[in-house]
Amino acid sequence: MSPTTSSPAITASGLRKSFGDKVVLDRVDLSVAEGTVFSLLGPNGAGKTTTVHILSTLMRADGGEARVMGRDPARDPDAVRAVIGVTGQFSAVDGLLTGRENLQLMADLHHLPRAEGRRRAAELLGEFELADAADKRAATYSGGMRRRLDLAMTLVGDPRVIFLDEPTTGLDPRSRRTMWQIVRSLVGRGVTIFLTTQYLDEADELADRIAVLDQGRIVATGTPAELKRRVPGGHVRLQFADDAGLTAAERLLDGAARGDGLSLNVPGDAGIHALRALLTRLDDAGIEAEALSVHTPDLDDVFFALTGRPSTDTGSTDTASTEGVPGASAQTTDTAFDQKESVR
């Protein structure tokens, strides 16, 4: 993962948004360092997509301030659009066009010279492993291929900040990992990624920093490791060769509890010093463990502890609350979709 010491690419202070009587964002503060992956987590309906809509100029906040690469999305939306790309929950790919034609259309929308547009399309087709299917209609692509093409279309304009809103929903494990590799590659070039996802392993794998949004408020921020340390439940599992060793260790170690088979779970910090002290106690008592493994809380534990809900919560989405708001429907999540429709 990238270091997080660079200047902010995105900031938000006191963002507020309501739809009727429903408060979707309630004084949200964010800071995203340039050239990093920032993940916004939260249950369905927490306000994740609304946040993306505001930062990417698709919706105005009711209050608060935001900056994207120093520009104000509300007051200077064109300047923000010039430096961002958006890959939303719903693909902007036109199934009637080939992969190459989709990319060349985006090049035209960015006013690239024709030769430069063809070169850029060919470059992206190769980079996203779509060259063999370049001249096939996108409607024939698999889900993973369509998502790769969707992201490639976002990159035609060489954005400095990319909003990925639930980018791997519905993809098989192999396609998800391909997308992860692409995200790492982009960050390696200095691109900032703002990721919303309900796949906690995805955030754990990719994010430099995470914010947890619940009922419109940020309830925690930090690195994945920092958030995990906030949740109790870490333990060391000791495996023994026989019941005698297991029983002796259970008597020696306060709070230890038997697990499956001849295993013993010892609660506490799994750091180097704690492990050394644990092994020293066993050695001084003449007790030999056959194997040792460390178990720490994962982001599922963090999510549940902070929101009171499992990560698979299926409540209503915050996009549903945007019904009737111009430019805020799920179908307009991706700016590329709007651009293509206007060209037609």
Image (cartoon, rainbow, N blue to C red):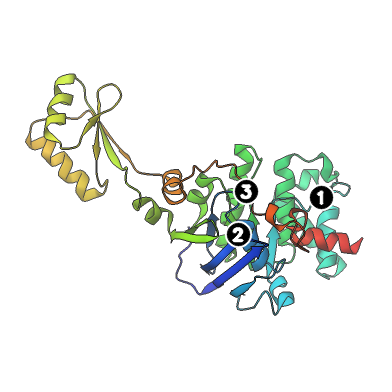
Q: Amino acid at mark 2?
A: Leu
Q: Which residue is mark 3?
A: 179
Count of residue discs = 3
Element on which disc 2 rests: helix
Q: Residue furthest front?
A: 21
Please name the residue shown 89% across and 63% down the image. 343
Lateral position of residue 140 relative to residue 51, left or right? right
Asked whether the viewer can see residue 118, the reply is no
Q: Quadrant of the C terminus?
A: bottom right
Between discs 1 and 3, the one toward the N terminus:
1
Nearest the camera: 170 or 141?
170
Label 3: how many residues lie within 10 Å, few (<14), some (14-19) or many (20+)? many
Element on which disc 3 rests: helix
Q: Which mark is residue 99?
A: 1
Q: Which mark is residue 186?
A: 2
Between discs 2 and 3, the one toward the N terminus:
3
Q: With respect to residue 164, does 141 lie above or below?
A: above
Lateral position of residue 235 relative to residue 63, left or right? left
Q: Position of residue 57 (x, y in %)?
A: 70, 69
Label 1: how many residues lie within 10 Å, few (<14), some (14-19) or many (20+)? many
Q: Position of residue 2 (x, y in %)?
A: 48, 62
Instruction: Give the quadrant of residue 111.
Output: bottom right
